[in-house]
Structure formats: structure tokens, C-alpha cells
Amino acid sequence: PGRYAHLNAFVNTVDADSINARVATAVNSSPTSNVDARSPHGRLIAIKDNICTADTPTTAASGILKKFISPYDATVVRQVREAGAIVVGKTNMDEFGMGSHNIHSHFGRTKYEQKDGDRSAGGSSGGSAVAVATGQCWAALGTDTGGSVRLPAAYTGTIGFKPSYGLLSRWGVIAYANSLDTVGILGNNMDSVEGLFDVTNEYDHQDPTSLDSSTRSQLLTEGPAPSKSLRIGVPMDYNISTLDPTVRKAWLRSLRLLQERGHSLHKVQLPATQHALSAYYVLAPAEASSNLAKYDGIRYGSRAEGKDGTADSVLFAKTRGEGFGPEVQRRILLGAFSLSAQAIDNYFIQAQKVRRLVQQDFDKAFANPNPLLNSQAEVNVNGVDVLLCPTAPTLAPRLSEIQNQKPLQAYMNDVFTVPASLAGLPAISVPVQEDDNAVDAERSEAAGMQIIGQYGDDKLVLDLAKQLL
Ligand code: GLN
């Protein structure tokens, strides 16, 4: 806080005296020299403000939840606290997770300062990314529904990991689109990312979509031996004409680095990818319109001042009109429309079909069969172990470029992140320099590269990420 307050990365912080006291206790109970580099013990952790904490408000950066204090900690918060981590505060975000630049927050945008001016911090976990990038915490929890951990990581030069859907508990995480929502981790190095994953990757009976223990036991528990040569898939459908030259250079460089380490490269076609973004922007708002129905100032949320509800409006029209920002209102309208009797066949049902095609594309590409579909299936010998592609088509855009953008242009930033979300796959974004002269920062810029694995191959994805850093 203090020195970084103007960045607005935090919506609420725990008071400094209490943080200092907890740090002192942690240091006394276990001197840092005894603590493993991966252990969250005594480390400062920031939590995205749509994840419930009992000691600070949880607002999801929405006006309607500005006074909400959860009576309990989310499971992931309990897990990091039990591992000895110190939660320092709640990070800024796009309201309810809806956005790609962290500009749609009731508390104002998160600032991502660069030498040449302000840029987008990425969204929706922009606060978590800036908190990590500026060293205000060791690591942060975010959420990733369609890219909200990976995109901010790519824009801020940090690491952002979205585990397979169902591995990390969603209990106590404010729902945006349940079938896509995952908790993710942001860090400056792989130790912190893996350290937080170690303590949160656990079955939770309170989350009905938490992957059960017997299926977990069939997943890879270890990464491959460091010497193993992997088959790396290069999805040609991601090589779009509008790819920023720096991003393309960083992509080529990462492929070369992996080849030099003994891995082989293989072209892969994922034809349904071109429809993934449209499908996502039908499905996510549809689920959101249903999830957000409970914020009416009666069941959840603050009521608007004065009288709400007149002869011709419902009891919560004013409350919802004032409580939700414009992007959230747009999504609710979009979602309610695509679920309506006149539109469901043409929009919602079609989008579900596209989602299935996207999943099938991935299953065809990977060597390992999807353990959720058929754990007895044969390994596809022509398949690949992981896919490597950019996280986003461009580097972090300047704030001046995005201020007057149409919503559709903001949605385009998610084109490379939503396919893995639709399929529930593990994916990580790591910063890769465009050329070997990383020391000469004037000449070399980093772009976020994304490694996507088959469902449950989270350790493999993490392991390969280490080879790119
Ligand atoms: N930008 C995407 C959206 O607005 C992704 C959000 C997310 O992953 N929470 O839906």
C-alpha cells in the first residue's frame, strides 16, 4: 500500500500492524532459512476480491456488494492461511470478473504504469497481477473464467496459471459462469505458483464440481523426467494475421528454445477455435445472467437509497440499475436474451455445440486421452503432449487506446484464452522475451506465451513452463 496506493491494485487491505505482527510470528515460528522456496509459510498473499474472506469485505468490485462481508473464508483462502500464508488484502478487478482491462471496477481502474505511460493491466484479475508485478505480495489468487488470470499475467510480465477445471475449490468464490470458473494463481516465479498450487489442489466436498479423489488419483502426480523429450503442438489457427510482430517473435523464440532442449515441434489444427470466442460470449453471459439474479438488495446486495419499485417497475429495478456497472448490465441483458424462448435455439444451444467441438479438437490433438471421458482409451501416438501459443494477440495496449473502445474490441483480447476455458484444460501464461538480448530492455520486449495441456496434465504444464523461464 503507501507507495503503491495510486496503482489502485487493492480494494481493501488488512491493516499494516496486523500484517507485521503475523509476519513476526511466522518468522519466529519458522526462520526463513528453514522454509522451502515453494512454501507459502510466512509469505504475503493477495486475494482477488471475488473470493470470500471473513476479515475484509468481498465486493467483486461491484457497487451492489460494496458493503458485503462474508461470514466465512473461501476454501482456497482457508487452505493458504492454513499453510501459513499471510493474506494482505483484496485486489481490484473488473466487476464480477467481466472485462479484460480492469477498467470496469466500482472502485476505479487498476493502474499499470510503464516507462512510456499507462497501459492496460489486463483483466479481470488486473489488481492481483499489478500487486504481484510490483512486488507487493509473493503471489496472488485470481479467478479465470475465460482468461482473467492469463491475460493480466501476459500484460504485466508475470506468470498466470489456470489449473484444470475442478481441481481448485470454488466454494466461497463469487460465481460468474460456473461451468467455466476456476481459481488461478499469479506469481513472479514458478516457486510461488507451484507453492500455492500444492496447498490448494485438494478435493473439497463443499464444491459439487470439485474433482473427486478417485479421479484425482488417476492424474499425473509428477511432471515428466527433465530429460524426457516432449511433443509440442503448434496450433496453426492461432497464427492470425493481426498477431503483433513482437508476440510472433516471442512465439518463434519459445519454440526454438524448446526445440533446443530436445523437444519436437508438430503442427496442430484446432479448427473450431475460430468460433470459440463467439461461443464463450454467449455462454458466459447466459450463466452470469442467472447467477446475478440473486443481487436484488433483498437476498443479496445493498439496496438503493429511497424507495425502490413503483407501479410499473419491479421491487429491485433501482437497486440493480444503480448497483451494477454498465458492462455487467450489458452481460445480464445479453445472457437473458440468449436464454429467452425466441433466441435459445440460435444462440445458447449453438454455443453449447461449438463448446463441444472445441473440446473435441483438443482431444484429437493430445496424445493422452481425456481422463474425464474415457480413462481406458489408448494413447494417440500421433498426438502432442502440450500446445504452445501466445496468450493474447498483442502486448498490453495503452490506456488511451482502450478508453473509448467498443465492448466487442475488448472481447477480442480473449481470443486465445477462451478455448482452454471452454474445454476446462490447464493453461499457464509465462513471459518470454522476443529475442535473446533480454538484458537490453530497450530492444527486447516480453510477451505472454501460453502452454495448454490435456485435462489433468497440470504438472506437465507447470514443468514445461519452467523450461521457458
Ligand atoms: N474477459 C473475459 C470476460 O469478460 C474473461 C473474464 C474472466 O476470465 N473472468 O468474460
Image (cartoon, rainbow, N blue to C red):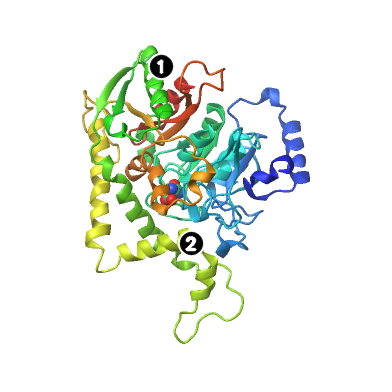
Q: Secondary structure at mark 1?
A: helix
Residue at 61 percent across and 61 percent down: it is 66
Crowd rating for badge 1 (residues with CA inside 10 Å; few <14, some 14–19, many 20+) = some
Q: Which mark is residue 326?
A: 2
Residue type at mark 1 is Leu
Q: Which mark is residue 257?
A: 1
Q: Between tags 2 and 1, which lies in front? A: 2
Q: Is residue 221 visible?
A: no
Residue at 56 percent across and 22 percent down: it is 441
Q: Is residue 13 visible?
A: yes
The quarter holding residue 30 reads: top right
**Whole-number angstrom distance, CA of label 2 to CA of label 1:** 44 Å
Residue type at mark 2 is Pro
Report if the beta carbon of the residue with label 2 is closer than 8 angstroms to ligand 1.
no
Q: Which mark is residue 209?
A: none
Image coords of residue 267 (percent x, y)? 25, 25
Image coords of residue 10 (percent x, y)? 63, 47
Report if the beta carbon of the residue with label 1 is closer than 8 angstroms to ligand 1.
no
Image coords of residue 109 (percent x, y)? 58, 50
User: 412 or 78: which is nearer to us?
Assistant: 412
Residue at 42 percent across and 61 percent down: it is 330
Residue at 48 percent across and 75 percent down: it is 317
User: 331 or 139: which is nearer to us?
Assistant: 331
Q: Earlier in the sequence, mark 2 or mark 1?
A: 1
